[in-house]
Each structure stands twice: as C-alpha cells, then as structure tokens.
Image (spheres, rainbow, N blue to C red):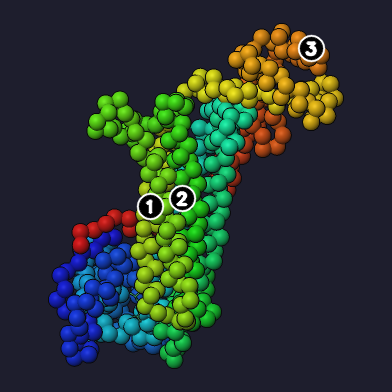
Amino acid sequence: MAATLNTPDENVWGTLFGEGSSDLLTEINSSVRFDYRLIEEDIEGSIAHVSMLGHVGALPAQDMAEILAGLRVLQAQARAGELTLDPSLEDVHMNVEHCLRQLIGPVAGRLHTARSRNDQVALDAKMWVRRAEARLDRHLALLIDVISTRAVEFAEVAMPGFTHLQAAQPVSFGHHLLAYVEMFLRDRDRIRSAHTRADESPLGAAALAGTSHPIDPFFTARALGFSSPMRNSMDAVSDRDFMLDLLAIGSILATHISRLGEELVLWSTAQFGYVQLPAELAAGSSIMPQKRNPDVAELIRGKSGRVIGNLVALLTVLKGLPLSYSRDLQEDKEALFDTFDTLDVSLRSAIALMSGLTVDTARMAADATVGNTLATDVADWLVVRHGLPFREAHLSVAQLVRSLGERGQQLHGADPAWIRAFAPVFKDLPDEVLTLQHSLASRTSPGGTAPASVRAAAAAARVRNHSRSPLPGPPDEGPDTKETDQ
Ligand code: ARG
C-alpha cells in the first residue's frame, strides 16, 4: 500500500461549523501522516460493513452495489499507491469516505450508517496488528530454522560457557545457539496467544453504545477473519489490549534479539575472535583503515530501546483514561508502527547475520579451557571414582588449581603426571578427564550440552518450529512496511 498526501486545502469540520478551523487544529489533530498505513484495512472493513448493511436490509441493494463498486475502485487505487490523501481531512477514515464521495457522489454518505470512527479505527488497527503478528511470526520461524541448522553444524565445537562473563565450563557452540531458539520459540507462542485474544471484531459498537440499526456484527466479524464480535460496545471502542500485547511481546522479542546482538558484538572483537560477521553487513571506519565494525549487530542491540519505549508510551497513554473512546487513543499508532518496523528489520537482520556468520572453531575451542574450565569435571570424577562428597572434591580441586596457578599454570596444559602426584586422590586421574571432548560428551543430562544431545535438540527444535502453523494473513505481505512520499 502506498498513499500520498495533498497540501491542506479544505477543512472537514470547518464546513460543519460554518467557519474555518485553525491551522493549529489541523496540525495537532491530523493523523494522516501515519494512519495512512491503515488504508487497506479501512477499505476492507468498509466493504464488509456495507455488505452487512445490504444483507440485513439496512441499505437498498442498489446503494450497496454502488458503494461496493466505489470501494473496490479505491481498493485497487490504494494498492497501486494512487490515492492522494489530504491531511486537513483529519485521518485516513475521513479521507477514504471523501474519495468515495468524489467517485460515486452523495450515496457515499450511506456508508457510515450504524458505524462510528470509534469502532472503525479499533477494527482497522486490530486487523493491522493481526497481520503484523503473522508477518513477525514468519520471520521468527525462519530465524529459528537458520539458528537450528547452524547449531547442528557446531554441535561438536567447544567454546567457553560463561557465568558472570567469567569462563565457567566448556559448552558446545551449537548448544549456546539453541538457547536462542528456545527464546524465539517462546516468542512465537506469545504471538499465537495474543492472536487468539485479538480474535473479536470491534465493528458494531458504533460510537460507544451500539446502534438502533438492525446490524449483524457476526456477519462482519466472519467476513473480516474474526471468530466473533466483541461482547461489550464500550470495551470495543476503548480497548487497545491487542496493541499492548504486540508491544509487550515485541519488547520481549527485541530483548532477545538484543542479547544475541550483544554476543555477536563481543564475539567478533579482535580479543574474542570467535566469529566474523558477514562482510556485506560490516561497516568500515572513516578514520581507522583496519576497522570492520559490527554495526548491524549493534543496531539490533540498540533498537530494543525504542521498542521498549513504545510499550511504556502506550501504557502511559492508556493509564487512567476514562471509558470509552478519547482522542488520546490516536496516540497509539506511531508507537505501534514503529515497533513493527523495528522488529521487522531487526529480525531480517538477525536472519542475515546468523546465516552468514563465519566461526573460528579452533579459536573457540582453544579458549574453551582457558580459566580452568575443566575444574568441575575433575571434581565430578573424584565424586564418582573415589566416592568423595562433592564439597570435599570441590576443596581438593580448588587446592590443585591454586597450586597450579602459583606455578603459572592451568588445569588444561599442565603435566598430568604432576597433577597425579599432587595428592593421593588424584593418583589415578586419567588424562581423558582433562580433555574438552570428555567434558562435553559427559554432560548428558536432559537439556545439557553433550554434542549428541545438541544434535537431537536441534532436530526437535525444527520439528517444534514447524508444528506451529503459519498465522492467517496475506500470503506474502504483512501490513505495509514502506514509507511513502508525503
Ligand atoms: N483518528 C482517530 C483515531 O485514531 C479516529 C477516531 C476518531 N474518532 C473521533 N470521535 N474523533 O483514534
């Protein structure tokens, strides 16, 4: 969809009140510069509404046919980006009605029978949100597939696992990646539950109280892909929970993406040197010739700030707002559109980063033992081999590690014979316990990092991902994502 804006020429309420309103009113009142993005949903909603009016006999068949024909023309024009919108006509809804009148004459005035902009805007926004959710969900499904595939590739690759950002125990790099898969699968579940809650159509509430016309809101609900109409007309026009849901879920999702971005930034430093970001996604520095900056990873980290801000902004608008509709609710849309746009580009960036990432597996593995990360393996061996209480085993290994440290050494790389001679409990310690391979392979507890478990978990994650069927939405496109010339 695309829409263009005219320069202000006519004021919609000026004619009603018999005098021109001030430019200031237009400036603060007009939402066209952002709500033009609802135009397709607005026209679809009107098509359903006028069909319903004809169906129940609230509108003569001839009028219905003329209005429908006009709306279909506008629909094609909107899709082709050929509709010109006028900011002085307040919002997208007034603009569509105005264009319809230009096209088919005064019969256009019958479209708004039994409807208010209050239920109309709630409907348009809800339809837009559902499509946005479907689109984000498709991106998430792809991201999960990409990461699970790479997790299999790196199932055997050891890296240091961190707690407190201190080297803790070796883990499989594939295992580390699958932690993100779990987060993104939960994000898909959250989107689904929000989608289910947003399954009631607000249309039919009219301004706030319902209407005396013999409408059939079940007809419009079904025509527009909802399972039923909302049950309370005052809730219908004032509810924005469906938006809060998307902004809240989006904030959690953005937080996940941000953590991934941060790890990519860290891992791609010269100091870590674990990964190289895809060359086409790295930016240079204007002064330092050697630099390859991880801008895309930094941006997916940083953009989470705005997404979280948008949630707080809408919560703040809604907090304390009396029932039912107040114009404050117009302030919902910029936060919504910005959150969607930000998540859309962040997810596509995460997909590109994760599919194009090159990994220095030797460097990772070499780092995996730095910081005595095999200490727990030795303590566990003492428990199993010599029946030591874990606390005693812990103490013995701590003494061993301290003595090695005094000699400038670490567990890995030290002479195993020296370790065996250090104390009687260590005398039969096999060399194998001091290897990465043993360490990883031994962690076979459910959800653990053993490479065989990681491969199985990655395969299971793909199955879980695909068992969540795509959400209903336009087949290839979600809501409009393009800015238009205004
Ligand atoms: N542009 C308005 C909004 O976004 C549409 C509803 C206006 N309703 C009204 N009674 N002024 O909320």
The CA distance from mark 3 to mark 2 is 51 Å
Residue 364 placement (x, y as % from top left): 52, 24
Residue toward you, 168 or 127: 168
Q: Where does label 3 land, which residue?
A: 427
| N-term mark: 3 or 2 | 2
Quarter of the rendering containing residue 386: top right
**Residue furthest front as drawn:** 406
Kind of residue at badge 2 = Ala
Disc 3 residue lies near ligand 1 with CB under 8 A:
no
Quadrant including the C terminus:
bottom left
Residue toward you, 411 or 201: 411
Q: Where does label 2 land, which residue?
A: 254
Indicate which label's residue lies in the foreground, 1 or 3. 3
Kind of residue at badge 1 = Thr
Q: Where does label 1 land, which residue?
A: 342
Q: Are marks 1 and 2 in contact (CB under 8 Å)?
A: yes
Disc 1 residue lies near ligand 1 with CB under 8 A:
no
Q: Residues within 10 Å of mark 2 (few under 14, many from 20)?
A: many
Residue 252 visible in the displayed image: yes
Residue 262 placement (x, y as % from top left): 46, 39
Residue toward you, 399 or 182: 399
Kind of residue at badge 3 = Lys
Q: Which mark is residue 4?
A: none
| N-term mark: 1 or 2 | 2
